Amino acid sequence: MPEREHGRQPRRRQDTSSQRRRPDRARREGKPVASQQDQPAARPPRPRNPRQDGKTRTGGAFGLSATRQAAVLAMVVCALALSVAVPLRTYLTQHAQVEQELAQQAKLEQQAAQLEQRKQQLADPAQIQAEARSRLGMVMPGETPYTVQLPGDGQQGGQRGPAQQQANNSPWFEHLWDSITGGGS
């Protein structure tokens, strides 16, 4: 006898013509036939909520519809992009700064090499004396200073005013003092 469900006995189906045909069909297909006196096989009880068995759900993974899955996927991709974008931007900025610093370092090393070369040149007393004569107009005791004026220099001097001519003939320290005090030109 079949099991009782909650104190009730299962209903018996009435014999219909379709049930009579089934054993014949089953014999043709080679399936075992239950006698008419036997009861039909008991079906498992149907779930009350259609979502209790996995067949009636419309959603895929995690019970979400395709649209919701796409929205969740888009949010995850955006979160990953943002979490990668900030460190990537920082890396690229720092990389550019490092390249600038390396270029500046190479420039400073070149300047240091030039200054070392100039230092070695000025270590010679003859070079210092030559620099003093040419840049500062210094003369050794007992020497007579003189200046050579070329014919082209006279034309340029004629175009200049008298204040500019005096400024060019004055020593360097007067130019310096005039630039500090604001006097002269």
Image (cartoon, helix red, strand yellow):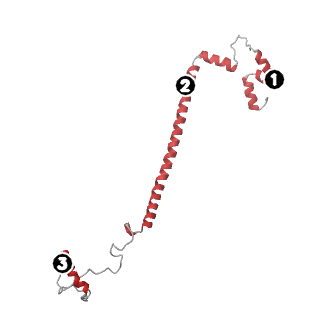
**Residue to which mark 3 is pinned:** 27
In depth, the one of 65 and 133 nearer the eye is 65
Q: Disc 1 marks which amino acid? A: Gln
Asked if residue 7 can be seen in this view, the reply is no
Name the residue at 20% across, 78% down. 26
Mark 1 / mark 3, whichever is N-terminal = 3
- Do tag 2 and tag 1 residues touch (Cβ < 8 Å)? no
**Numbered disc in front, either 1 or 3:** 3
**Relative height, residue 52 to residue 149 (above, below):** below
Name the residue at 76% across, 29% down. 178
Q: In which image quadrant can residue 156 be found?
A: top right
**Relative height, residue 113 to residue 6 (above, below):** above
Q: Is residue 50 left or right of residue 144?
A: left
Mark 2 → mark 3, Cα distance in angstroms: 112 Å
- Residue 169 appears at what percent x and percent y? 77, 20
In depth, the one of 123 and 28 nearer the eye is 28
- Residue 22 appears at what percent x and percent y? 22, 81
Mark 2 / mark 3, whichever is N-terminal = 3
**Residue to which mark 2 is pinned:** 116
Q: Which mark is residue 159?
A: 1
* Viewport quadrant of the C terminus: top right
Mark 2 → mark 1, Cα distance in angstroms: 42 Å
Name the residue at 51% across, 39% down. 99
Q: Is residue 125 left or right of residue 13?
A: right
In depth, the one of 56 and 160 nearer the eye is 56
- Residue 9 appears at what percent x and percent y? 24, 89
Q: In which image quadrant can residue 20 be found?
A: bottom left
Q: Disc 2 marks which amino acid? A: Glu
